[in-house]
Image (cartoon, rainbow, N blue to C red):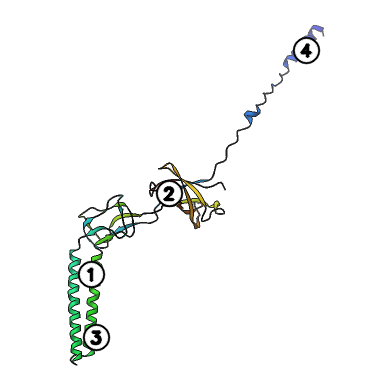
């Protein structure tokens, strides 16, 4: 084979060899290392403000509302009459019962005088005593009926809702007003059950209320004795460390516990 042909074959074989793969540049160390994430200051869970006590007052008897002495958001004191029902019929029955009691007492006194004169026996005296006691019980019953014509506040607080209007006829058991007790509010929250080892009464934390944009100190006052099997949470009850007039029942926020 001629020398020129050998040179041609050598050049062809060299051109068929693949080019060396280029090695990509190593990434910068600063870009490869992610910036560390700052650890949270503490664990947070949702919290709801609730009143210490709340109730719905219902009408004990059927009747018509004569006076309505409360309105939405108004304050009241313990024992204050909030609603007055018309009470003409119960008052009339009370007067009848009192008249019957007076008659029974008079008959008993007469029987006792006759017994002193040996004109009445023990049986007549006992029957007169029973009649007087029955009349006295009727008076007590009618007085209880009359007392139900006035719906009074069980404690000091504020009116959350009014279900009725003046001169409205109501039935027995019909809701009249919703009341919330005055005083410090309670906090209700559900913590993860895995926290049970650290949760105990007296544990302090902070509450960030959304409606006010402020933080308030609080303290755990009760831990439920049962874990919710579905959500794997345990219910907590807490109290605020002070009195804050700007806070109202129903407000919500975040409970911020110290880092565990």
Name the image quarter holding residue 9.
top right
Q: With respect to residue 251, does 87 lie above or below?
A: below
Q: Which mark is residue 142?
A: 1
- State how far apart marks 1 and 2 are (Cα): 45 Å
Q: Nearer the viewer, residue 13 or 129?
A: 129
Local crowd size for mark 4, using a 10 Å CA cut-off: few (<14), some (14–19), many (≥20):
few
For the residues labelled 3 and 1, the Cα–Cα distance comes to 25 Å
Q: Which residue is mark 3?
A: 126
Q: Give the residue at mark 2.
A: 48
For the residue pair 207 and 26, the one nearer the viewer reads as: 207
**Sooner in the amino-acid sequence: mark 1 or mark 4:** 4
Instruction: Kindly check if marks 4 and 2 are in contact, taking CB atoms under 8 A apart as contact.
Output: no
Q: Secondary structure at mark 2?
A: strand
Quick one: label 3 or label 1, which is nearer the N terminus?
3
Q: Residue at x 18, y 89 (%)?
A: 114
Spatial CA distance of label 4 from label 2 is 86 Å
- Could you tell me residue 201's position as x and y percent? 51, 56
Q: Which residue is mark 4?
A: 10
* Sequence-first disc among 4 and 3: 4
Q: Position of residue 206 (x, y in %)?
A: 49, 47
Which residue: 24% across, 81% down? 130
Is the C-beta separation of discs 1 and 2 under 8 Å?
no
Label 3 Cα crowd, 10 Å radius (few <14 / some 14-19 / many 20+): few
Res 20 quadrant in image:
top right
The mark nearer the N terminus, 4 or 2, is: 4
């Amino acid at each position: 084979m001629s020398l020129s042909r050998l040179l041609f074959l050598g050049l062809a074989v060299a051109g068929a060899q693949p080019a060396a793969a280029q090695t990509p540049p190593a990434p910068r160390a600063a870009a490869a290392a992610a910036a560390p994430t700052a650890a949270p200051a503490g664990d947070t869970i949702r919290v709801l403000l609730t009143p210490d006590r709340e109730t719905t007052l219902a009408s004990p008897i059927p009747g018509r509302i004569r006076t309505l002495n409360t309105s939405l958001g108004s304050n009241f004191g313990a024992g204050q009459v909030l609603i007055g029902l018309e009470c003409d019929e119960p008052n009339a029955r009370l007067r009848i019962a009192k008249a019957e009691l007076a008659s029974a007492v008079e008959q008993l006194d007469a029987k006792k005088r006759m017994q002193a004169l040996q004109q009445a026996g023990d049986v007549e005296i006992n029957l007169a005593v029973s009649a007087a006691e029955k009349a006295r019980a009727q008076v007590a019953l009618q007085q209880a009926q009359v007392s139900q014509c006035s719906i009074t506040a069980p404690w000091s607080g504020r009116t959350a809702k009014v279900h009725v209007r003046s001169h409205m006829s109501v039935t027995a058991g019909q809701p009249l007003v919703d009341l919330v007790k005055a005083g410090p509010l309670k906090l209700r929250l559900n913590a993860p059950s895995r926290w049970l080892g650290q949760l105990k009464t007296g544990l302090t934390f902070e509450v960030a209320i959304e409606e006010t944009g402020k933080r308030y100190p609080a303290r755990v006052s009760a831990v439920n004795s049962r874990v919710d099997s579905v959500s794997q949470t345990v219910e907590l009850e807490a109290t605020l460390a002070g009195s804050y007039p700007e806070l109202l029942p129903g407000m919500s926020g975040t409970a911020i516990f110290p880092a565990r």
